[in-house]
Image (cartoon, helix red, strand yellow):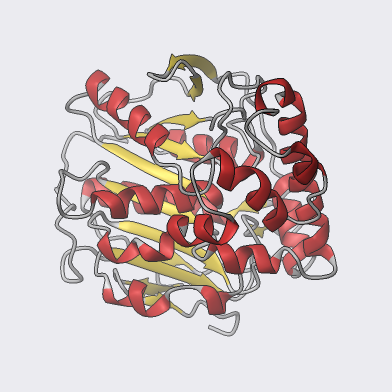
Amino acid sequence: MDFSPTMDDTSGGRDRHTWTARHYRPPWWLRGAHGQTLAGKFLRPAPDSMLETERLETSDGDFLDIAWMPETDPNAPLVLVLHGLEGHTRRGYMVQTFLALADCGMRAVGMNFRGCSGEMNRKPRFYHSGETEDLGFVFGLLRRRFPTRPLMAIGFSLGGNILLKFLGERGANDTPAFSAAVAISVPYDLSAGADALERRGMTRVYAGYFLRSLVGKVRAKKEILANVLDLEAVWASATIRDFDDAATAKLHGFAGAEDYYHKSSSRRFVQSIRVPTLLIHARDDPFLAAAALPLPTIEANSFLTLVLTDRGGHVGFLEGGLPWNPTFWVEEQIASFLVHCHQGASTTNPDATPILPGWVDPNTENL
């Protein structure tokens, strides 16, 4: 794909930035929210032999590991991709996104948050849902290395919250960091997301999985954290909220879990985003109910495009007629949107609902 001709889309506006999402059709064999969520994790192949890891030394004496896809077209956008809570760059949804971008001629680079690349970071601090300094550090490095190349960004779940907060913090008062962005299954309201993970049933299973991983990281660094945290309170954490109160908040300068959730939730920042940004969310996302989405704020911002599907779970969105050969709708939409933003070309599809920035796509199964 030739990326030589470009068009500046950063000014946004409903009259200039049109794009069409292909209608999402959940397969007959995978219609439930939890099935989609689990299948999204276990049925996405993750071939990672093509990834090359680079270690970046940070100014505070720590490090970040980033993973590069091979170069494609040096005129094409470079796309930074952020993973979710306790994820990493070799997760299936990350690798499938890298491959979808490569199919369109774009090069991806994945960012591992501190302590997520398979090696524990050096400093007491970790990462959290509102930590944008490391993202700013990586963005600055990419901009210095590629001063004229278009930079775009994608964030999944927690990574999407970080990305939206970062974009909102920069707002209209600075040169846009990225020329376009996509955020998938974002917990816009972190307190509501914590509430969702405290419900009975499968959501408690998800919470237990995350909690074991997070507490395990504190155990791995207990020698350097013993004088920073009340470790007994960390070990006693029964919920994500308990852990955030005992560890996340104290390690990162918040008064407690609620203070952390309030200051870090991306819903407080989306109104200030001035970069064409695609938001994809499922109404049945078990990590955040659709009622917690900041819909009026999104609708009022002409730089935002929301695709809200009835089904899809959390970072699921699988399609396909057979369980052993699924296809990945969300990766396709990500690549389509970013190609459109870069080329300034209008994408049409008679089987889809036209989307304009600020519009909410009903995308119901009966369309």
Q: At which x and y percent is residue 147?
A: 19, 25
Is residue 186 visible in the rendered image? The answer is no
| Vertical order, 169 against 293 (above or below) | above
Front-most of 126 and 85?
126
Q: Image quadrant of residue 20?
A: bottom left
Number of numbered tags placed on the structure image:
0
Quadrant where the N terminus is found in the figure: top left
| Left or right of 297 in this view: 190 | right
| Vertical order, 109 against 266 (above or below) | above
| Left or right of 304 in this view: 103 | right
**Residue in the image at 38% along x and 64% along y:** 268
Is residue 228 visible in the rendered image? The answer is yes
| Left or right of 141 in this view: 118 | right
Front-most of 49 and 154?
154
Q: At which x and y percent is residue 123?
A: 55, 22
**Residue in the image at 59% along x and 21% along y:** 121
Q: At which x and y percent is residue 195?
A: 67, 68
**Residue in the image at 35% along x and 72% along y:** 298
**Residue in the image at 22% along x and 63% along y:** 17
| Vertical order, 28 against 222 (above or below) | below
Which residue is outermost to the bottom? 366
Q: At which x and y percent is residue 189?
A: 52, 66
Front-most of 263 and 186?
263
